[in-house]
Amino acid sequence: VTDSVTYVYGIMRNPDPNVVEGLEGITGSQVRLVRSGELAVIVSSVDAEEFGEEALRKNLEDLQWLERIARGHNQVVAGLAARASVAPLGLATIYFNDDRVRATLAEQADVFVEVLDRISGRAEWGVKAYADLNNPALQAKPATDLEDQETPGAAYLRELRERRESRVNAEQMALELAGEVHAELAALAHASRVHPPQNRQLAAYEGLMVLNCSYLVDDTAADEFASAVRSAADKRPALKVELTGPWPPYSFAVLPDEEQR
Amino acid sequence: VTLANPNRTARAPDSTREVREIALVDLLDRLLAGGVVVTGDVTISLAGVDLVRISLRAIISSIQEGSLDIHGSERGEDG
């Protein structure tokens, strides 16, 4: 028999015993509940060697492994979130056994309840906005009409300067537009969180990513939020706006003292 | 303006197919910097920054080696 350890996906309040039905854990093992009081942690067993400290460090450097675990983790959490509110955990939280999970659950019950209160009946929506800085809509001033009287050298220098300035202006303008979009959407959300712009190569996008935010939105207001995104985008044709979701509320299942991360 | 919503049909994201449509990078934004953080028994500085840095470095270097296959870039090509 291989040694196993306990991998944790999320925390729920008074879940129905069959909330885990049909869900497959990250390495194919069964997903189950570990209860303490009104709370339950959703876990599955994983191989102790593969998820041991040393192996884990190496495995997380392996993109294929990371992707498999990240998608597997999300599949379980999203499956749960479709059935009831769940406070998702970050990737790769591992305990030696179920008893250790139970002990942590009892120890930090207050905090988990607080997180569950905040996210219950709500989902996370992601909004990204991109700007093409060469878009004429972001060019503030029309071209001047001095070309005829300039020497070629002066014209060249002026053009260089204008190109530089217009790039700075375009970026400024795009960021302002993104700020307006964010303000409109944040007004409809319980909370919002700013993510850093994504790595261009990794995310394979064109232009400048001027917005990468998450919003915590009531399930009942999901449609309203989606149309607000659409209308915010329509009003600002210089931006390309993208909506993802609903996500389990990963970005808002943080403990109060780490909110500023 | 393209308003892409890769998960438009993912209201009840039970099926593998729908989950696969999520872009890995969007998922990592959330899984590496979000979620409840508790100190597990096996811990490798999961409380944030180190893991993010380590993993993203790995991702970026694998891109540079040309071995990355990003799934689910469902977004529209044109603005």
Image (cartoon, coloured by chain):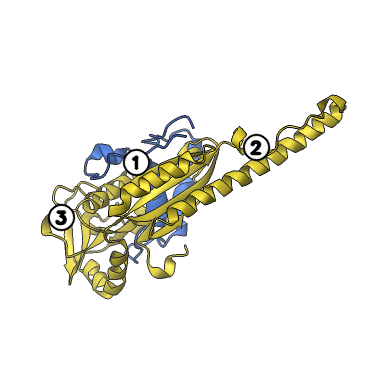
Residue A40 figure quarter: bottom left
Where disc 3 sits, the SS reads helix
**Residues packed near mark 1 inside 10 Å, few (<14), some (14 to 19) or many (20 plus):** many
**Residue on which disc 1 sits:** B22
Q: How many marks?
A: 3
Residue B71 lies, in percent from the top left, at: 36, 36
Q: Is A221 placed left or right of A163 in the picture?
A: left
The secondary element bearing badge 2 is classed as loop
Do discs 2 and 1 belong to a common subunit? no
Upstream in sequence: badge 3 or badge 2: 3
Q: Which chain is blue?
A: B
Tag 2 residue: A139
In the depicted structure, whether residue A29 falls above or below residue B48:
above
Task: Describe the element under mark 1 as helix, strand or loop.
Answer: loop
Chain A shade: yellow
Could you confirm whether marks 3 and 1 are on the same chain?
A: no
At 58% from the left and 49% from the top, the residue drawn is: A176
3 vs 2, front mark: 2
**Residue for badge 3:** A19
Q: Chain of mark 1?
A: B
Q: Residue furthest left?
A: A17
Q: Residue at x 81, y 33 (%)?
A: A157
Name the spot of residue A65 as percent of width and height, x first.
Answer: 34, 44
Amino acid type at mark 1: Ile
